[in-house]
Image: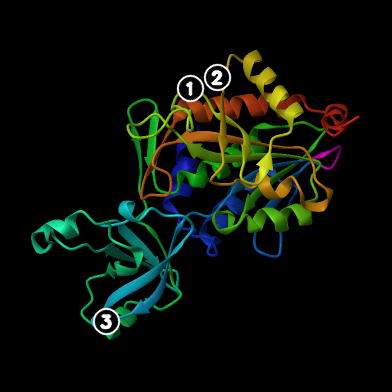
């Protein structure tokens, strides 16, 4: 794992619809290893390496879940809408960063009522999103405006990144900066003249896989590897039957999600290459969410797709947790596979006779 790369991506702010900062980071890292960098009409990045053979897209979405300013009260409190999926109970007392139109970052706090001011009944009731507000320490709407904050500004959890022990990364927006980091590292490590790599950072995955659709229509790849995260079920309170992934036990092969089924030949190929490298892997499914595979597998006539996901604790919150061993296992397996891939193998994956 290139920890410095992942840290820079996690500390950047890129709520769905406002992916500029992560896009610029990816461009800076991909320019030296790509023959061309282009974009789709929504702003997804498509970096091409090579010009022969089948086009292989390596896809990670750039955006993260967050919020948007919807109202500023006379006394300086900010009401907001959620962007992407949030659980209300994980939001209270989060520190946040509001990205202003000038690109400045204004710190804030999703406020809560002290327990001293709540009745016993109120303490038992979850706070609804519509009741929440952000406090930036301003005393009036004019003071909020003076700090550059306006309706329509995007809000993310306060950036954070840390390494805990030998094997854990805890950070904001690991969903899906890990996919972006893996894509960059693969573009750097894979040197196979028999294929054309398309390192792709998509926009707006968290609000409907929109960048997956537009980038698929733009680049028209022959085969797609989606890199994302998935729920780790190895904490108290989660049913391990429905969420079997464990940190440190290898990346997850997503067999299906709400909008995608893995190509079975690609599943078999990934297992084969992982086992040849003595790399661990796990299997998972996801009926309540979707990855970018759900658009790449159907756009423009369709193509073979596999989604490979790092087990992740505490998704869609202010900080999540992954295993470095899982990251490295996925990176090493894919690098070996892609360096050996040729047009004959890709044709076999696309042959349904």
Direction from residue 147 to residue 289 in the image, left or right: right
Region in magenta:
51-55
Circle 3 crowding by C-alpha within 10 Å: few under 14, some 14–19, many from 20: some
First along the sequence among labels 2 and 3: 3
Q: Nearer the viewer, mark 2 or mark 3?
A: 2
Instruction: Name the residue carrying label 1.
Output: 249
* Residue 67 percent coordinates (x, y): 42, 64
Left or right: 24 in relation to 36:
left
Left or right of residue 239, residue 213 in this image: right
Look at the numbered disc 2 and give the secondary structure of its residue.
loop
19 or 299: nearer the viewer: 299
For the residue pair 239 and 173, the one nearer the viewer reads as 239
Within 10 Å of disc 2 (Cα), the crowding (few <14, some 14-19, many 20+) is some
Q: Is residue 228 above or below residue 334?
A: below
Q: CA distance from mark 3 to mark 1?
A: 50 Å
- Give the spatial CA distance, label 2 vs label 1: 6 Å
| Mark nearer the N terminus (3 vs 1) | 3
Residue at x 78%, y 56% (from the top left corner): 217
């Amino acid at each position: 794992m290139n920890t410095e790369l992942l840290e820079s991506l996690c500390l950047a702010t890129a709520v769905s619809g406002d992916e500029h900062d992560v896009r610029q980071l990816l461009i800076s890292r991909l320019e030296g290893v790509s023959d061309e960098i282009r974009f789709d009409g929504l702003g997804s990045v498509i970096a091409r390496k090579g010009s022969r053979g089948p086009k292989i897209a390596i896809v990670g979405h750039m955006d993260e879940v967050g919020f948007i300013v919807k109202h500023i009260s006379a006394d300086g409190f900010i009401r907001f809408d959620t962007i992407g999926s949030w659980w209300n109970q994980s939001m209270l007392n989060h520190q946040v960063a509001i990205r202003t139109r000038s690109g400045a970052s204004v710190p804030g706090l999703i406020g809560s009522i002290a327990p001293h001011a709540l009745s016993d009944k109120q303490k038992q009731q979850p706070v609804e999103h519509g009741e929440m507000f952000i406090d930036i320490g301003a005393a009036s709407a004019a003071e909020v405006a003076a700090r550059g904050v306006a309706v329509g500004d995007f809000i993310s959890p306060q950036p954070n990144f840390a390494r805990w022990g030998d094997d854990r990364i805890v950070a904001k927006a690991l969903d899906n900066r890990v996919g972006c980091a893996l894509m960059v590292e693969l573009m750097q490590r894979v040197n196979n003249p028999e294929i054309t790599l398309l390192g792709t950072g998509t926009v707006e995955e968290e609000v409907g896989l929109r960048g997956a659709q537009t980038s698929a229509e733009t680049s028209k790849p022959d085969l797609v590897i989606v890199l994302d995260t998935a729920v780790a079920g190895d904490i108290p309170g989660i049913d391990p039957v429905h969420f079997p992934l464990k940190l440190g036990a290898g990346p997850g092969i997503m067999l299906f999600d709400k909008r995608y089924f893995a190509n079975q030949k690609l599943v078999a190929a990934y297992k084969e290459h992982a086992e040849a490298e003595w790399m661990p892997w796990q299997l998972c499914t996801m009926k309540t969410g979707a990855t970018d595979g759900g658009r790449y597998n159907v756009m423009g006539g369709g193509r073979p797709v596999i989604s490979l996901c790092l087990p992740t604790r505490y998704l869609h919150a202010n900080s999540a947790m992954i295993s470095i061993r899982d990251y490295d296992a996925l990176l090493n397996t894919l690098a070996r596979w892609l360096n050996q891939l040729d047009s004959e193998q890709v044709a076999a994956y696309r042959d349904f006779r």
